[in-house]
Amino acid sequence: MNSKQSDKAKMAPNVDPHAVLPYGDTLNDGLVQVSFSLPVALSPEATEAAKRTCIQMGLKEPSVYHQADLGHGFSYYIVYGKLTKPVDFARIVVPKLQETVASFDEINDRIKRKLGRRIVVIGACTGSDAHTVGIDAIMNMKGYKGEYGLERYPQFEAHNLGSQVPNEVLLRRAIELKADAILVSQIVTQKDVHLSNLAELADMLEAQGLRERVVLVCGGPRINHEIALELGYDAGFGAGSSPTQVASFVADEVIRRH
Amino acid sequence: MNSKQSDKAKMAPNVDPHAVLPYGDTLNDGLVQVSFSLPVALSPEATEAAKRTCIQMGLKEPSVYHQADLGHGFSYYIVYGKLTKPVDFARIVVPKLQETVASFDEINDRIKRKLGRRIVVIGACTGSDAHTVGIDAIMNMKGYKGEYGLERYPQFEAHNLGSQVPNEVLLRRAIELKADAILVSQIVTQKDVHLSNLAELADMLEAQGLRERVVLVCGGPRINHEIALELGYDAGFGAGSSPTQVASFVADEVIRRH
Amino acid sequence: MKGMLDLDLEQILRCRKAADLVAKSVLAFAGERTTVSIERATLRLLGVEGADDTGVPLVNRVVEKAIHLVPGGIMLPFAKAMMDTGSNAQETALAISNGQIELCEDAYQSKTVIDYADHLAAEAVARIHKTVSTRNELLERLGEGQRPLLYVIVASGNIFEDVVSAKVCVDAGAQVIAVIRSTAQSLLDYVPEGTTTEGYGGTYATQANFRVMRQALDEASKEAGRYVRLCNYASGLCMPEMAVLGAVERLDMMLNDALYGILFRDINMQRTLTDQAFSRLVSAAGGIIINTGEDNYLTTADAVESAHTVLASQFINEALALRCGLKPWQIGLGHAMEMDPDTEDMLVLELAQAKMAREIFPDCPLKYMPPTKHMTGDIFKGHVQDALFSLVSVMSDQGIHLLGMMTEAMHTPHIHDRVLALQATRMVMGAARHLGDEISFVPGGRIQKRAQEVLAKATELICSVADGGIFNALEKGHFADVSRGPESGRGLEGVYVKAAWYSNPIEDLLKKQVEWRGASNNE
Amino acid sequence: MKGMLDLDLEQILRCRKAADLVAKSVLAFAGERTTVSIERATLRLLGVEGADDTGVPLVNRVVEKAIHLVPGGIMLPFAKAMMDTGSNAQETALAISNGQIELCEDAYQSKTVIDYADHLAAEAVARIHKTVSTRNELLERLGEGQRPLLYVIVASGNIFEDVVSAKVCVDAGAQVIAVIRSTAQSLLDYVPEGTTTEGYGGTYATQANFRVMRQALDEASKEAGRYVRLCNYASGLCMPEMAVLGAVERLDMMLNDALYGILFRDINMQRTLTDQAFSRLVSAAGGIIINTGEDNYLTTADAVESAHTVLASQFINEALALRCGLKPWQIGLGHAMEMDPDTEDMLVLELAQAKMAREIFPDCPLKYMPPTKHMTGDIFKGHVQDALFSLVSVMSDQGIHLLGMMTEAMHTPHIHDRVLALQATRMVMGAARHLGDEISFVPGGRIQKRAQEVLAKATELICSVADGGIFNALEKGHFADVSRGPESGRGLEGVYVKAAWYSNPIEDLLKKQVEWRGASNNE
Ligand code: B12
Ligand code: B12
Ligand SMILES: Cc1ncc(COP(=O)(O)O)c(C=O)c1O
Ligand SMILES: Cc1ncc(COP(=O)(O)O)c(C=O)c1O
């Protein structure tokens, strides 16, 4: 996930912002690459089915460039085709974290000045998820990609409960520690298990009457800010997030609420 | 292009032949991989545009797994999503070459017995196309993948004119040689140049009143039998075709017409 | 023989000695303990299967009911109950579970019970031996193809979908099929029952699922004309039971590494090291190749800096395995290619390390793991990372090659992900088949130096572990950058110090049959 | 110095001698002839540009009108017309084209005309020198990055889309941008005019398109902080004119190989070998790196069996280039990795050959071509084939690396195809940066043997070519499995035997400035 983000305005020459189509080698050629398997053995009819599958997707002139029988009644296809339905790019609005990412020193300074005490943060990788690398990247001393994690911030009191933490335990500890913010990591997403885990925690917090007081943040490779809001969180951080982004947001939000 | 072809009937367990969907790891999950570029710089809105592009394609829950800014107002996406519109596989009918592929000896024998003279075949890679490997594979002595080419068949008189042959020249030579069959190869397909080239030759043959007499066959990686029929050819041979397939068809068809 | 890397043989010897000290003390510790899972495993060896109507496995019911007997071992009381009622193990277990009979302590002293138990033990062991000879016959008849063995995972959550995927993989050249377990299973203190069609990040490991897949692979083996190995996990809280199920259902390979459970599942170290001793004994007898989990260290620790921790741990795992009676050919030590692919000379360093592992453990198959941590959503990049991995693997003559998937950063593999991976791997390995034979390394160059450096650092580490003991090393976070205390983690409540009269005739018989060198603390 | 491959140096010497004999006789033949395109190229060097209202280039118009003067060379008559009318080259050409003036024969004897022509020649050559010094300044100032130079093609048919693609490529690390020509252009006996937005399988090479792309790349170079080279084709029927346009528009690299045109475009050999002598002279002066086309042989001939034909042809092309005044650093000899990737030990053989080329031509950059023939619609497989190619390239220290595209079997590349290719190539090359330095080849092993065998067969072939002459060899189908007769193919009608009074002052001046060793037949 390359996160070099340019500004929205920038476009290739001659693009109509109201009608953006995929680009192969000529503006508006609509070229798209597709691959999939079908649960039918390879045959001329199966190839035709692959083409029709692409036609279902609105692809004109689908070319099946590769097809292979996988055995046992399966076949695989690589297809290129031309999409003709454009997207109205000019009208897209995406909810964004309003934070301006501050630096390590700025953040500590701001907390000191505006809050006058340390922010208590508690983090965990919840449920049966044992992937700690992500939450560690945000919280641990050594941090991530050259940025320190929350534990290193003098103005954060950071508690990282590690992996496989049941929502009940996380909540109990948050209450004990009077946490200002809870950070939840969810990495395993098969069958959308992360969504139900996260929703459950938000509900539990609500039920405890703590939802207003505690800043609730989630993160993971399949999380984004939009999903987080839908799940009742205050923010969501996706792949490639950095500790300062998170620290900035949490500090600002805790300060705002006090 | 793997051309191991199984029969149409074979399917994975529990598939409904009237509603076939792509298969990721579970029947009917509909999973499809897609990649494309958009002519807009990477931004949260661009990512959203990529998702919407996939939604245009009928993909539910598109996940943008990779995104990269390509610079100069372009960005690239790799997305997975779930197609929900199935294909009615049971109702697909594909026109097929009716030939039963015979062997080298059988073919020669058949021509000798049923026609009693050699079949004159003329072949070329036409227009400005200089890709001779395909037509050579079918016609040259040494043949292709262990099968002899037409030149080696005692019962074929094969003339390979090579590359970059204008349609006029091909037709003139065909008349001079009293060719029973014309084999045309078209490899360069950019901007569909092969289709216009092929259509032109068919028209010229028709105009000469020779269309009935001469078996007209085309081939190339983007050719298939269906396209060939549409273009007014008797048969079309795609990627991976073998000399015996072609020899079988030509022999049977020439015999049939006499 | 001086290898291509000009490694210091004396250093290697030093590592082996230190590792053996570590292993000895671990096994001494384990020898003094048993666990609920070891006892349940023993019951499984006697033939107890299935669950009661609430879904709790019978073996769990029995051990729960007789929890007070665990320090003495469940087998003699159970054997006595069988004798007393004249019923078989399954019936007996049912009766206990129903509360119809109760196990009691007076079995331990009875000569007839002991004799009967010995007889049951002989039967149990014979059952294992039968799977061994079936496997050997099949291997003899069919062979299993070229090394490295191509190992792919299936993990849809649904065992029946997994079967389909597995067969497709075999067609595409897979030689080992591993069924990955559902995310939380290792934390369950019981083995689920029956065939299953739902899982998260994997498919539950159950005896029924083992059978379904074994049968499917036997069919596929026949069609493919080569024996296809089945792999699962003897790990988590039920490690000993899993080892037993593997042995009786003719699995061929099992991931088995207490250190993995400690570091990555937060399983209590006392529990799992004790469990592991029993498990490895069973696997030794069952002719199973175990795979260890050092490769995982490089997902949390840096692959360049921490390469030596992998090597140190391999020495320990080797020693632990040998002492439990496993033969070198059964020890698939884990290592991995986990460096950031954008590291300059990544391939040079990886080749050095892969070759180093090969030279240091020449008789172990080695389980070589593909890039995972630095895989991204860019499947095209990922496919190339995996190709480089295949190249290093074939150049360095690995034994078990776990296939990298271009979709590693996204999902458990789709049906074609595996096929594409197999095709690419076979192409690369074919293209570079003898490349490794055709080159030698420049003396004193980057490759030799890297290997020497890693070995030197490993020597230092392992000597310190030998000094301080494994518990201490784990607490200090020497492995995987993760720290675990001896009392922390799950499952400690299931560990019991053995009573003086502890008896487990099956274990005793197994120990006699393999070259067990674990129990004695005064070697 | 004895290389890693233990090649027979005496054999290499023998090849060079034989190749030089071949080159000498080719250049003697060419020296006796001129062609319409050489004469047009001369007019272009004088500054004639543009087309008349029917779209026919002025240079074609002039040469057509004065076709009877071609044997004596167009330059003196043209210079005389300029003198007579007092107008510049462009105006003169227009006037001739309009029929306002006619060229006549009496120029050849006139001392004033000759003096004036020499003056014009000096100006023309100065124009070339100016591009050379601009390039050198830019290179000095910006550098051009690590070798091998990463070379990608753009080919949408539309020069403006090509510019966009090229800039994206530069961002992604491309060091050379080549604009591929439309399918039929090489068969045109004129250079199209103006910027173009339609082409098939490529974009027309026109002077205007050259300018557009050169300017775009100069901008991109500035942004990237490294000089990005522009490449096009000095080939086909207009080879000499293309070389001139390349030299004046500051192209840095040009594909230039008469053998390619003969074998793959069915261009007449007399025509194109004559054209080539002039073209190489111009490129030598223009500081242009030429790329030869031996790599293509392996698309029609088998890559395992015919590897030696590539080497033999490289020797010939080297000799031809050196005799035309090109310096070794300007000679990008073509070779390719075209073996079926499913060939066992493909990588072993390819590494041997790539390294062999490197050792035999240590001072030439070598243009290494990726797999094309065995690329299929399976883009995932293709991406791995290309990765292996990158690996061999960096291991064997190539100079110019043409990027393989996973979509090779489908279309000219899409915008991201190139970026993905550049990313993968840079990853592989970074990961294996010093791998080549860290290994040596086992003496007498597969790698050394393969290289030795290819060299031995090439020696045999090239000696037979030296004996029979190149025309004969081409007729026998020694190269690319294609046979061509000396009278066959396109463009023979444009070849003229020079009259005794033939004169081309620009050519003469250029020959003086480079180490031309072609004309003299009695060396
Ligand atoms: C390392 C790893 C492991 C290690 C974990 C070690 C550890 N202690 O963490 C080990 C080897 C133990 C492991 C095991 C398993 N894994 Co795993 N693993 C991975 C792997 C290779 C890398 C994950 C990682 O570390 N990424 C690097 C970190 C830095 O990125 P990140 O997690 O996205 O975190 C960043 C952001 O998301 C964000 N973030 C994350 N959390 C949070 C939280 C907050 C509050 C904030 C603000 C931000 C934030 O910030 C971070 C920094 O930028 C991935 C594949 C991959 N390449 O992604 C598979 C992967 C995640 N694993 C997977 C699976 C299935 C498993 C197993 C279930 C397999 C099995 N059946 O045995 C087991 C069980 C684990 C369990 N119980 O959860 C799957 C998940 C599939 C899915 N989508 O559901 C993956 C995708 C592999 C695959 N394709 O199958 N795994
Ligand atoms: C070899 C090759 C060349 C060689 C050709 C040598 C020769 N004498 O043939 C050389 C190097 C000269 C070349 C040049 C060019 N090439 Co080219 N070339 C290829 C390449 C690598 C392989 C083609 C091949 O030989 N395939 C093997 C044969 C056996 O397969 P086949 O042609 O499909 O034939 C089989 C079937 O299709 C069928 N068949 C084919 N013809 C016929 C005819 C009949 C009657 C029948 C029955 C069957 C049949 O049977 C055959 C056997 O199974 C392809 C890329 C690729 N991997 O496909 C590019 C490719 C075809 N070339 C391409 C291009 C653009 C060019 C150039 C125009 C580039 C340029 N601008 O300079 C030039 C110009 C060529 C020209 N004027 O036509 C493009 C075409 C893009 C497109 N889709 O339009 C491709 C796809 C590469 C790319 N991605 O850019 N090329
Ligand atoms: C050695 C080892 N054991 C076990 C596991 C995971 O399995 P589980 O958590 O299901 O025990 C892994 C995972 O990769 C492993 O490497
Ligand atoms: C040496 C050489 N010249 C020329 C060409 C093709 O260009 P054209 O046909 O446009 O001259 C190629 C194509 O790859 C080549 O390798």
Image (cartoon, coloured by chain):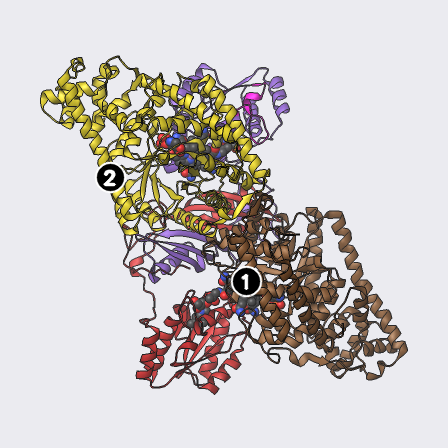
Chain colours: A red, B purple, C brown, D yellow
Q: Residues within 10 Å of mark 2 (few under 14, many from 20)?
A: some
Question: Residue placed at 71% from the left, 68% from the top?
Answer: C279
Q: Amino acid at mark 1?
A: Ala
Which x, y percent locates residue A254? Answer: 36, 81
Q: Amino acid at mark 2?
A: Ser
- Regarding residue A206, the answer to whether it shows in the image is yes
Q: In this rendered view, identify the residue nearer to me: B29 or C81.
A: C81
Up the image or down, C8 lies above or below D167; here it is: below
Which x, y percent locates residue B234? Answer: 49, 28
Q: Secondary structure at mark 1?
A: helix
Residue where numbered disc 1 is placed: C307
Q: In this rendered view, identify the residue nearer to me: C359 or A226.
A: C359
Q: Residues within 10 Å of mark 1 (few under 14, many from 20)?
A: many
Question: Residue placed at 22% from the left, 22% from the top?
Answer: D505
Up the image or down, C309 lies above or below D213; here it is: below
Residue where numbered disc 2 is placed: D133
Check the picture and name the quadrant holding the C terminus of chain C: bottom right
Which x, y percent locates residue C356? Answer: 59, 56
Q: Secondary structure at mark 2?
A: helix
* Quadrant where ligand 2 appears: top left
Decide if residue D299 is on the left or right side of residue D251.
Answer: right
Q: In this rendered view, identify the residue nearer to me: D401 or C507.
A: D401
Which x, y percent locates residue A20? Answer: 32, 53
Q: Is residue A87 magenta?
A: no
Q: Is residue B140 magenta?
A: yes
